[in-house]
Image (cartoon, helix red, strand yellow):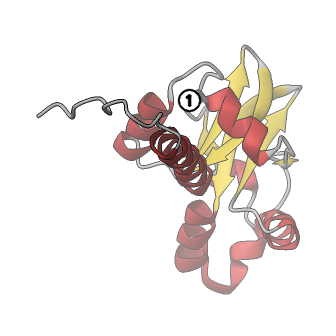
């Protein structure tokens, strides 16, 4: 399975924000849209990523003044991105090694979507469920009188 297939399952709704906006506005968008991240765009290109992790850090550090902090000050600048043709195993390894719950998917300079760890888990679960159903159907429909293939030890 490739990243582009996960995007097909998930859909490609994009939530972006300009880095000169305030954190309170970003939190409002994230809350209203029920998303855990926003891609930060400036001048037509991705310059950062804001996730709930950065929001919590600012809330802890700034207290009641957190909402007035600029997104630019706290966003992850120039985040790693996935390629649409990346294999899901490479994607999982990248997300785990880089400690990323959200990863933008870029085709050159074009944002195709954002993949969350939840999206990856859901896609893998659906793929395994499909394979399981196909194997059960294959076994169930095995012709009578023929021996099923031997299991390899």
Q: Which one is in front, 21 or 118?
A: 118
- At a point 77% along the width and 36% down the height, the residue shown is 8
Element type at marker 1? loop
Q: Which one is in front, 71 or 84?
A: 84
Image quarter of the C terminus: top left
| Residue 35 location (% of width, % of height) | 75, 62
Image quarter of the N terminus: top right
Q: Quadrant of residue 110?
A: top right
Q: Which residue is mark 1?
A: 1
| Residue 67 location (% of width, % of height) | 77, 74
Q: Residues within 10 Å of mark 1 (few under 14, many from 20)?
A: few
Q: Which one is in front, 85 or 130?
A: 130
Farthest-out residue, left:
153
Tell me: residue 69, above or below residue 144: below
Q: Is residue 144 left or right of residue 120?
A: left
Farthest-out residue, top:
108
| Residue 71 location (% of width, % of height) | 73, 54
- At a point 73% along the width and 37% down the height, the residue shown is 7
- At a point 58% along the width and 61% down the height, the residue shown is 54
Farthest-out residue, front:
145
Q: Is residue 25 left or right of residue 98?
A: right
| Residue 24 location (% of width, % of height) | 81, 71
Q: Which one is in front, 17 or 126?
A: 126
């Amino acid at each position: 399975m490739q990243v582009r297939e996960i995007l097909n399952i998930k859909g490609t709704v994009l939530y972006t924000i300009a880095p000169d906006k305030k954190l309170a506005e970003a939190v409002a968008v994230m809350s209203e849209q029920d998303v855990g991240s926003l891609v930060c765009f400036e001048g037509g290109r991705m310059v950062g990523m804001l996730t709930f992790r950065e929001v919590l850090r600012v809330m802890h550090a700034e207290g009641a003044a957190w909402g007035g902090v600029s997104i630019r000050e706290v966003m992850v600048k120039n985040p790693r991105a996935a390629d649409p043709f990346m294999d899901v195993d490479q994607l999982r390894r990248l997300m785990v090694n880089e400690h990323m719950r959200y990863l933008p998917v870029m085709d050159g300079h074009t944002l195709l979507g954002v993949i969350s760890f939840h999206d990856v888990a859901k896609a893998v679960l659906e793929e395994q469920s499909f394979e399981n159903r196909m194997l059960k159907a294959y076994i169930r429909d095995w012709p009578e009188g023929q021996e099923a293939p031997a299991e390899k030890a």
